[in-house]
Amino acid sequence: MSAVRVAVVDDQRLFATGMQMLVDAQDDMTCVGIAADGAAALDLCDSEHPDVLLLDLRMPVMNGIDTLLRLGERVGDRPRVIALTTIRRDDAVVAALRAGAGAFLTKDALPEVVTATIRDVHEGRPASTESEALDLLRAQGTPVEVHRRDEVLDALTAREREVFLLVAKGLSNAEIAASVFLSEATVKSHVRSVLMKLGLRNRIQVVIAAYERGLVRA
């Protein structure tokens, strides 16, 4: 199995270098480069094609949110993004999740939490901060567009609709598997199919899509 290719984007050179060293110390991942701003990050993604991007949200030249939006405009493979923040409950974190980040980490996170989150995001599993990310989204509130509620479900099979709604409620793959009496591998396959059919990048965006359509409530 090939190593997870990780890139670090942060304007604090000492922090970025420390993350690089942490990643390179793992047997199953490698740091393919670091960048100091969003513009340089886009160039780094073009040249090194990282699997996972650790992305600071507040940087000069181009901030993390704008970088996420630019990545979202691209066709083809894009890195899975973990937002880096100094403030846990921050509007910028919510904006990053809406723009496509799969998880977030505070900069004081323990090394084992950082590496576990990289692995989880790379594999499409719920990260350790997912429940907190969902709380942030719910606390901010999402405008409900009821006239759009059916279009998302019409694209899915009956089983996929069931899985979609359970993901939207914050259940992990293991919890979904126990709930609907399927194997965890089968649930993971259904989640992947839901994301592909709906053009969503990660589980967090399933939650956003469901809330926007009034399909789940806080």
Image: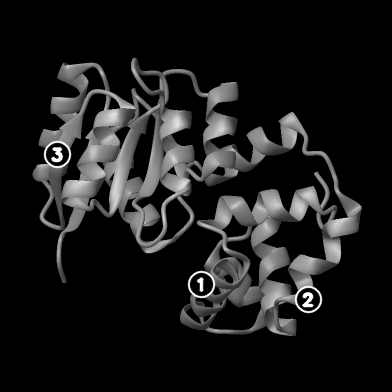
Question: How many numbered marks does the figure carry?
Answer: 3
Q: Quadrant of residue 70?
A: top left
Picture coordinates of residue 195, whole percent (x, y): 56, 66
Residue found 51% across the figure and 45% down from its top = 100
Q: Is residue 148 left or right of residue 58?
A: right
What element does badge 3 sit on?
A: strand
Q: Is residue 68 above or below residue 12?
A: below
Q: Badge 3 local density, few (<14 within 10 Å), some, or many (20+)?
A: many
Amino acid tagged 1: Arg
Residue at numbered disc 3: 33
Q: Which mark is residue 117?
A: none
User: Could you tell me if the residues under marks 3 and 1 are in contact, i.e. CB atoms within 8 Å?
Assistant: no
Q: Is residue 102 visible?
A: no
| Amino acid, disc 3 | Gly
Q: Position of residue 161 (x, y in %)?
A: 73, 74
Of labels 2 and 1, earlier in sequence is 2
Task: Residue 130: give x, y in percent of width and height.
Answer: 53, 45
Please identify the quadrant where the C terminus is shown: top right
Q: Residues within 10 Å of mark 1 (few under 14, many from 20)?
A: some
- Quadrant in the rendering for residue 193: bottom right
Circle nearer the viewer, 3 or 1: 3
For badge 2, the amino acid type reads: Asp
- Front-lying residue, 178 or 57: 57
In the rendered structure, the answer to whether residue 106 lies left or right of residue 162 reads left
Q: Which is closer to the viewer, label 2 or label 1?
A: 2
